[in-house]
Amino acid sequence: MKADDKEKLILITNDDGLYAAGLRTLISIMKEFGKLVVISATESRSGMSQALTVKHPLRVKLLEEDEDKRVYACSGTPTDGVKLAVNQLMERKPDLIVSGINHGSNASASVLYSGTMAAALEGCLYKITSVGFSLNSYSSTADFSVCEEYIRKVCSMLLRESLPQGICLNVNIPALKAGEIKGMMVARQAMGSWQEEFEKRKDPAGKTYYWLTGRFINHEPESTDTDEWAIHNGYVSVVPVTTDMTAHSFIDILKTKF
Amino acid sequence: MKADDKEKLILITNDDGLYAAGLRTLISIMKEFGKLVVISATESRSGMSQALTVKHPLRVKLLEEDEDKRVYACSGTPTDGVKLAVNQLMERKPDLIVSGINHGSNASASVLYSGTMAAALEGCLYKITSVGFSLNSYSSTADFSVCEEYIRKVCSMLLRESLPQGICLNVNIPALKAGEIKGMMVARQAMGSWQEEFEKRKDPAGKTYYWLTGRFINHEPESTDTDEWAIHNGYVSVVPVTTDMTAHSFIDILKTKF
């Protein structure tokens, strides 16, 4: 596969690994838009946030190549994968980075832990238009086809009009049947957090270990302009996400504290 | 060590591991403020961002205990460590979480990759006042004593007055002699990114691998209100950092795009 300058060149990645159903759905849709480079790990890398691999070398393997796409396996995190693809593997900067479709919501505070969204944020830092898609279902038989219409809509828009520098999109799709979705809603990140319920167990040698489990708590369930409200009320949420983590509204107050 | 309700209880962590000089400096200062619980990995966990360990069980070991502190080794990431300490190891929620002192700057886009700052952000999500400190030096002989005065100032303020929900502080200290620092400056995160320069090598079997290297590029070197400007002009930068990644200023524009 070689993309000429007239064709769109799209980088696809995810954090659920190369064999995830969400990635396969995404590839099948994105083929309509241009030539694809796909990079991901062979195993899932969920909850990796924007982690980098700095203590181990990175390995990359070209797994598939045809007229329309190249598929690479990468030993690193989603962020490593974007860095490697953009710097080492692609003939030119992609026109679009599409990450997902994640198996599970990345709304609210989950954006902070998400490898899917980290890949999109990494795209932002390279000044590449980027988006992450997630389906609000952890079921192993989740039907990703409901996402197709909304991925087409969002990616058509993104290939037509670029986003401001440092901003990417976090798109979360409710796990409903296609006809049950009421539409798309531009929203803000809900204030929320995970309430941990560590499972404490003993291994066969009698030593304690912990499994991280937990459940999400929406701190503002009454707000109707959030991503959490949207996906629980039948809308696809679209949140513009920024790489600027400054709490700008608090700067002037903080100056008075020292 | 047991902290009664009258004493301050402080959680200390970092991403450079338990044997890092920055952590030792931080412990020696924070003892002045209250009882300490320290948790970190035995090895460094730099660049882990807000990664979670979900595929492997977590192990924790109590390494030291005296009148003033308990020190735990944790097999996970900085974020795992905060979650375990707050949920499983501490008698009550800490009054303050202090992360660092990181070996190297966490200004500008480095906040997105930083394990040090991820620990502080995790504190925010638990509604605990949190701060990360970093020294702008990667030298193995870096002198952390220059940080002491500023850590005392910031932590005194934080134990006196809490921060708004979802906001923590990112404090970066220039690697100067104490007398050369001009003071503290409340700043915003500079727009910047890392320009990667992967090192491509061959292993003894002839197979290619990559080392991630790179250098930081400040996209707005002329701006005088940023953390990058502050630390390169002799000031300790203090950036309020938010867990809300929404690009609020773009919401109304984005609504017109669909």
Image: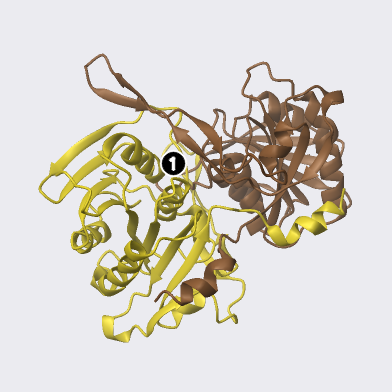
Chain colours: A yellow, B brown
- Asked if one can make out residue A138 in the rendered structure from this viewpoint, the answer is no
The chain containing the residue under callout 1 comes to A
Residue visible at 41% across and 28% down?
B197
State the image coordinates of residue A133 (x, y, percent, origin top left).
36, 63
The answer to whether residue A138 is left or right of residue B14 is left
Q: Residues within 10 Å of mark 1 (few under 14, many from 20)?
A: few
Among the 4 quarters of the image, the one containing residue B12: top right
Q: Which residue is mark 1?
A: A203
Element marked by disc 1 = loop
Answer whether residue B87 is visible to the viewer in this image: yes
* Residue occupying the point 21% across, 58% down: A27
User: Is residue B67 found left or right of A245 in the rendered image?
Assistant: right
Residue furthest out toward the top? B204
Vertically, is B53 above or below A102? above
Where does the image place residue B92, in percent across and percent down from the top left? 73, 54
Q: Position of residue B133 (x, y in %)?
A: 71, 38
Number of marks drawn: 1
- Asked if residue B105 lies left or right of residue A140, the reply is right
Closer to the camera in the image, A54 or B82: A54
Residue that appears at 21% across and 64% down: A29
Give, as a three-letter code, the residue at label 1: Asp
Q: Nearer the viewer, residue B188 or B206?
A: B188
Q: Vertically, is A174 above or below B33?
A: below
For the residue pair B180 and A190, the one nearer the viewer reads as B180
Residue furthest to the left:
A67
Q: Is residue A151 shown left or right of residue B22?
A: left
Say which residue appears at 82% left-offset and 40% top-offset: B184
